[in-house]
Image (cartoon, grey):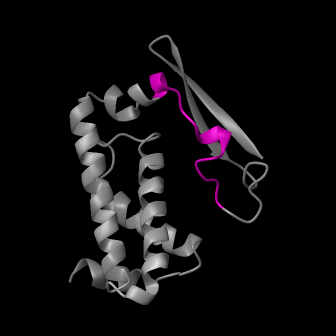
Amino acid sequence: GCAHVCRVRGGRRDRRQRWRGGLPSGHAGMAPGPECPELRWSVEEIKNTPSRADGVPDRDERVERFVACDYARNLSRAIFNNDKLQEDNCNRVQILACYYLQLFFMFRSLRQEDAKIVAVAATFLACKVVDLPKKMRSIFRALNQ
């Protein structure tokens, strides 16, 4: 099941969640998605991300997350060589990569990790989740095009 990890920071309760021994209930055989209640945040929690706690201004965080998602989308397109036959798969990879990137930065600060590296890792993971695994070598080739 899943275990909630709660931390108290500055007098407020921050929800952090991790999975041990499997996925949350109702997610057999697939990664949890946005419909998972354990992965929904309140407006207050969204305003108090780890990046904000590290002193990253709201606008800078939004811009950096957008740029990282754009990087992941472009990488996905490069991996699939803009092939029209693979367009649906490419779109699924892009959506999941951006989702994983946003999810990652709800737990880690932009000052702790390079957003572009997280975008590459999120794209790599998204390819595997949609059953289109790519070797890291092909991801690096796409990066260097």
Q: Position of residue 92 (x, y in %)?
A: 49, 69
Q: Quadrant location of the C terminus? A: bottom left
- Per the picture, the main secondary structure of the magenta-coloured stretch is loop
- Residue visible at 21% across and 81% down in the picture: 144
Q: Residue at x 34, y 65 (%)?
A: 72
Q: Give 114 or 75, whichever is nearer the viewer.
A: 75
Q: Is residue 79 shown in magenta?
A: no
- Say above or below: 97 vs 38: below
Q: Is residue 80 left or right of residue 23?
A: left
Expressed as whole percent of the image width and height from the top left, the position of residue 140 reads: 31, 80
21 or 134: nearer the viewer = 134
Let me know if residue 48 appears in the view.
no
**Residue occupying the point 72% across, 54% down:** 23
In terms of depth relative to the viewer, which is nearer, 94 or 115? 94
For the residue pair 110 and 44, the one nearer the viewer reads as 44
Magenta extent: 31-45
Examine the image and state in which quarter residue 70 appears: bottom left
Q: Residue furthest top?
A: 11
